[in-house]
Amino acid sequence: MENNLRKFSEVDNCPVRNVLDRIGDKWSMLVLLVLGESETLRFGELHKSIGTISQKMLTVTLKTLEADGLVKRTIYPQIPPRVEYELTERAESLLPLIHNLVDWAEKNMGDIKQARMNYAMG
Amino acid sequence: MENNLRKFSEVDNCPVRNVLDRIGDKWSMLVLLVLGESETLRFGELHKSIGTISQKMLTVTLKTLEADGLVKRTIYPQIPPRVEYELTERAESLLPLIHNLVDWAEKNMGDIKQARMNYAMG
DNA sequence: GTTTATTACTTACTTTTGGTAAGTCAAAGA
DNA sequence: TCTTTGACTTACCAAAAGTAAGTAATAAAC
């Protein structure tokens, strides 16, 4: 089987780095957030819902999340195919922490933008 | 002034994407975590402490964090130079959330590794 | 008095990661 | 027979990150 997943092997022994590589990549948290808002979503629905992700990256992000046991993939043998994605319990336990980050962000984004503007002015 | 910072302009209007781009990049959370463990750290100390980050990426990560008002940079006019970094209050308010992620990771890393092995076996 | 060490970076170059657009597969409907 | 549909691959290109060497300014060592 070819390996379409992200590489993490270098950091096997560092728990912090391990986690941050997993959920701190470009798309994983966003996919988890969106999946957390519905019972199940099909590939195309996820794609539309996120909007800015490419099909390719959605594929590899979902595969990685599935491999980590954070997403469950159910395939219905139809043509055209129907594949549904949903969060696992493990992911449900992670979701509140991500929501906390989002809340923090919403609270602080204004100030951060201001800080960034000031910084840019020199 | 040349722009050595990360680009975020495309996602100005999406708070979620906005945050995740900011702290969900490859190094920011790790730098915040390490800085959170000391009052202040010099560039070289940070570099040694993180170990796997390149000087270049440490530079741009620190600059971005500084621009966002998450890190304070103090330069002492000596030769060789002495530059100290420390968290701002805003970053201190974010730190617990990152620690929560780390705790979750430490709790779940074993299961995740197992899941990943099973997945790889097919 | 020329070399070396020190620290916080830059710069040029290479590798890795992510994005874009087109293609594939298999059946059903026009 | 040709098109449509959905979930992907694939080939190709752009952007981000890693590597290694260089820079600057001074003091200490030889």
Image (tube, coloured by chain):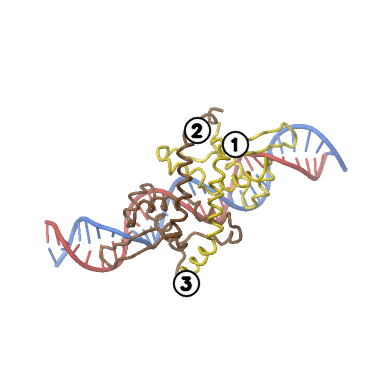
Chain colours: A yellow, B brown, C blue, D red
Q: Quarter of the image containing the C terminus of chain B?
A: top right
Q: Are marks 2 and 1 on the same chain?
A: no
Q: Quarter of the image containing the N terminus of chain B?
A: bottom left
Say if A91 sits above or below B80 in the image: above
Q: Amino acid at mark 1?
A: Thr
> Tag 1, which secondary structure?
loop
Q: Amino acid at mark 2?
A: Asp
Chain at numbered mark 2:
B
Mark 3 and mark 1 lie on one chain; the one further toward the N terminus is 1
Q: Position of residue A55 (x, y in %)?
A: 63, 46
Question: Cβ–Cβ below 8 Å for labels 2 and 3?
Answer: no
- Give the camera-side residue of B109 and A47: B109
Instruction: Look at discs 2 and 3 and give the one toward the viewer.
Output: 2
Distance from Cα at disc 2 to Cα at disc 1: 13 Å
Chain at numbered mark 1:
A
Crowdedness near tag 3: few (<14), some (14–19) or many (≥20) residues, C-alpha within 10 Å:
few
Q: Amino acid at mark 3?
A: Met
Side of B12 where C30 appears, left or right: right
Q: Name the mark on residue B111.
A: 2
Say if B119 sits above or below A39 in the image: above
Q: Which residue is mark 1?
A: A88
Instruction: Look at discs 3 and 1 and give the one toward the viewer.
Output: 1
Q: Which residue is mark 3?
A: A121
Crowdedness near tag 2: few (<14), some (14–19) or many (≥20) residues, C-alpha within 10 Å:
some
Residue at horizontal 67%, vertical 49%? A49
- Give the camera-side residue of A61 and B83: B83
Q: Are marks 2 and 3 on the same chain?
A: no
Distance from Cα at disc 2 to Cα at disc 3: 48 Å
Image quarter for residue C4?
Answer: bottom left
